[in-house]
Amino acid sequence: MLLNKEFIFFSKKVYKCNKCARLVNFRNKITLKKRKSYLDQVYWGKPISGFGDLNGKIIIIGLAPAAHGATRTGRVFTGDKSADFLFNCLFKSGLSNQPNSDHINDGLKLKNTFITLALRCVPPEDKPTKEELKNCSVFFKKELNMLKNKKVIVALGKIAFDACINFYKENYGLTGSYKFGHGSKYNINGLTIFCCYHPSPRNVNTKRINTTKMTYLFKKAKKLI
């Protein structure tokens, strides 16, 4: 079993990272120039570590922290519209104890599930560079390797999926071509990897993803553990 102290030590390293100048400048700008509705709040303003059941069998991978979500609250998928949508689906699937993720003291608990990110800092226009993703892959590798019980990975969006595939190519000798498509499933290195559209407001508003589609996919993942 993964010890909390091991993960805490890892997270402290994440929080101290200032390697990508563009991302550091952008997150600092967001932290200082707050959204009007959050002017009375102190923004987290640092990189984000993963959250959830450290011994979970389902790993959910997102792109990056939201500007006024995780960058503000300090917890992945917390305090923004993507979080509202995601946790409603996780709750309906029996993978969380509540349908909302508002702040770090809201009592949220994930069930057999851990959520992390391909990138630890919010990128401008949600578009990280290849160099930024490569820099962050050090944390991505360390975190995934710590999660010893993983059986299923759900990649939210193409960038998260590509980060996952690159991880297995660079560290486990994976070969071949793998394409992202919602609902696509791959069996890799003893795990099942599902592709899922990211629950961004744009994808939700255009109906590319909806509650039924995402809940169905999470329930399929749950059956495999």
Image: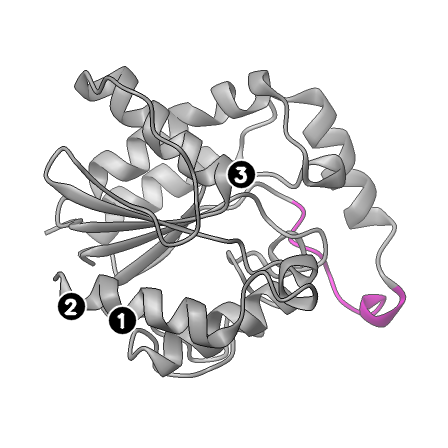
According to the image, label 3 marks what residue? Answer: 120
**What amino acid type should be assigned to the residue bearing mark 1?**
Lys
- Are the residues flagged by discs 2 and 1 in contact, CB closer than 8 Å? yes
Query: Where, quadrant-wise, is the C terminus in this rendering?
Result: bottom left
Q: Is residue 202 above or below residue 13?
A: below
Spatial CA distance of label 2 from label 3 is 30 Å
From the viewer's side, name the closer residue of 113 and 196. Answer: 196
- Are the residues flagged by discs 1 and 3 in contact, CB closer than 8 Å? no
Image: magenta residue range: 36-45
Spatial CA distance of label 2 from label 1 is 6 Å
**What amino acid type should be assigned to the residue bearing mark 2?**
Lys
Q: Earlier in the sequence, mark 2 or mark 3?
A: 3
User: For the stretch drawn in magenta, what is the main secondary structure?
Assistant: loop
Q: Label 1: how many residues lie within 10 Å, few (<14), some (14-19) or many (20+)?
A: some
Task: Look at 50% across and 46% down and name the residue there.
Answer: 157
Q: Note whether residue 96 is visible.
A: yes
Spatial CA distance of label 1 from label 3 is 27 Å
Horizontal relation, residue 29 to residue 69: left or right = right
Horizontal relation, residue 125 to residue 186: left or right = right
Q: Earlier in the sequence, mark 1 or mark 3?
A: 3
Residue 40 part of the magenta-drawn span: yes
Q: Which mark is residue 219?
A: 1
User: Secondary structure under badge 1?
Assistant: helix
Task: Look at 61% across and 61% down and name the residue there.
Answer: 73
The spot of residue 114 in percent (x, y) is 31, 57
Q: Is residue 103 above or below residue 3?
A: below
Q: Label 3: how many residues lie within 10 Å, few (<14), some (14-19) or many (20+)?
A: many
According to the image, label 2 marks what residue? Answer: 223
- Frontmost of labels 1 and 3 is 1
